[in-house]
C-alpha cells in the first residue's frame, strides 16, 4: 500500500514521468532506451524513475497500472502505455500533441 | 527454451483471435501480431492488457520481452487490401 502511495505521488508530481530500467544516459534495456529516444525526438521535458534502484516500485508499478512490463510512461498523472504504445503514438504524432498541447 | 509457438498456443487458448503470429527465436524476446474482435472499441492500453491477461503468469516469469501489435478485424481487412 505504501508503494502505491509513493507511486501516486510520483506520477502526480511529475508532468511527464517515465519509469524505466537505468536512466536516459545509461538505459539498461532496449525498450527503456527506445522510450527515451522517442521522448527526446518529441522534444519532451521528462523525468525518469529507475526501477532497478527500487525493487518495491519495480513490482508496485506493475500492480498500480495493471501492466506487467517496464518502461511505463505517465503524462499528467495518467498511464499512457509501454514502449509499443509510446512508439505507435510517436509515429502517429499523438505523443507530441499530448506532451505539448498547441 | 520458450518457443514462439508455445506463446501462440497460450494466447489462442485464452483469447478469441482470428489471426496470430509470434516471432522470436532467442527464447526471451518475442513479437506478437494479434487480430481479435475483442479489440474493437478499446484503447490501445486496454488491448494490450487483454493480451497480457491471456498470458497470465508467463509475463511475470518466462517472457522477458514481448512486443505486441493489436489489430481489429476491420483494421486487418484494410491492411490486407493495401
Image (tube, coloured by chain):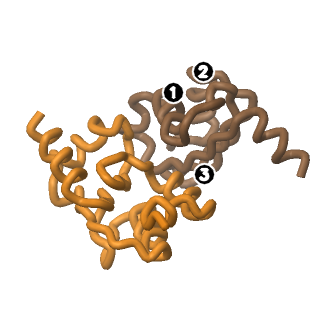
The 10 Å Cα crowd at callout 3, few under 14, some 14 to 19, many 20 or more, is some
Residue B74: image quadrant is top right
Relative to B13, residue A80 above or below: below
Q: Which residue is mark 2?
A: B13
Is label 1 in contact with label 2 (beta carbons under 8 Å)? yes
| Hue used for the chain lettered B | brown
Helix or strand or loop: what does disc 2 sit on? helix
Residue A30 seen in the figure: no
Are tags 2 and 3 found on a single chain? yes
| Hue used for the chain lettered A | orange
Q: Mark 3 falls within which chain?
A: B
Helix or strand or loop: what does disc 1 sit on? helix
Front residue of this view, candidates B68 and A8: A8
Residue A4 seen in the figure: yes
Residue B54 is labelled as: 1
Residue A92: image quadrant is bottom right
- Which marked residue is nearer to the observer: mark 2 or mark 3? 2
- Which marked residue is nearer to the observer: mark 1 or mark 2? 1
Helix or strand or loop: what does disc 3 sit on? loop
Q: Residue at x 50, y 43 (%)?
A: B1
Q: Which residue is mark 3?
A: B24
Q: Residue at x 66, y 43 (%)?
A: B33
Q: Earlier in the sequence, mark 2 or mark 3?
A: 2
Residue A24: percent from left, percent from top: 33, 73
Amino acid at each position: 500500500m505504501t508503494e502505491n502511495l509513493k507511486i501516486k505521488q510520483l506520477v502526480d508530481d511529475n508532468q511527464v514521468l517515465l519509469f524505466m530500467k537505468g536512466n536516459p544516459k545509461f538505459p539498461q534495456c532496449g525498450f527503456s532506451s527506445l522510450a527515451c529516444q522517442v521522448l527526446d525526438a518529441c522534444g519532451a521535458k521528462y523525468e525518469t524513475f529507475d526501477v532497478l534502484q527500487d525493487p518495491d516500485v519495480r513490482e508496485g508499478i506493475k500492480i498500480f497500472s495493471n501492466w506487467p512490463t517496464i518502461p511505463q510512461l505517465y503524462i499528467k498523472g495518467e498511464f499512457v502505455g509501454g514502449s509499443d504504445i509510446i512508439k505507435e503514438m510517436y509515429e502517429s504524432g499523438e505523443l507530441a500533441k499530448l506532451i505539448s498541447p498547441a | 527454451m520458450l518457443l514462439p509457438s508455445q506463446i501462440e498456443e497460450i494466447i489462442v487458448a485464452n483469447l478469441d483471435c482470428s489471426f496470430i503470429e509470434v516471432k522470436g527465436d532467442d527464447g526471451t524476446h518475442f513479437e506478437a501480431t494479434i487480430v481479435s474482435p475483442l479489440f474493437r472499441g478499446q484503447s490501445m492500453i486496454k488491448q494490450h492488457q487483454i493480451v497480457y491477461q491471456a498470458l497470465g503468469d508467463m509475463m511475470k516469469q518466462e517472457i522477458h520481452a514481448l512486443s505486441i501489435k493489436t489489430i481489429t478485424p476491420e483494421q486487418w481487412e484494410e491492411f490486407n487490401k493495401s
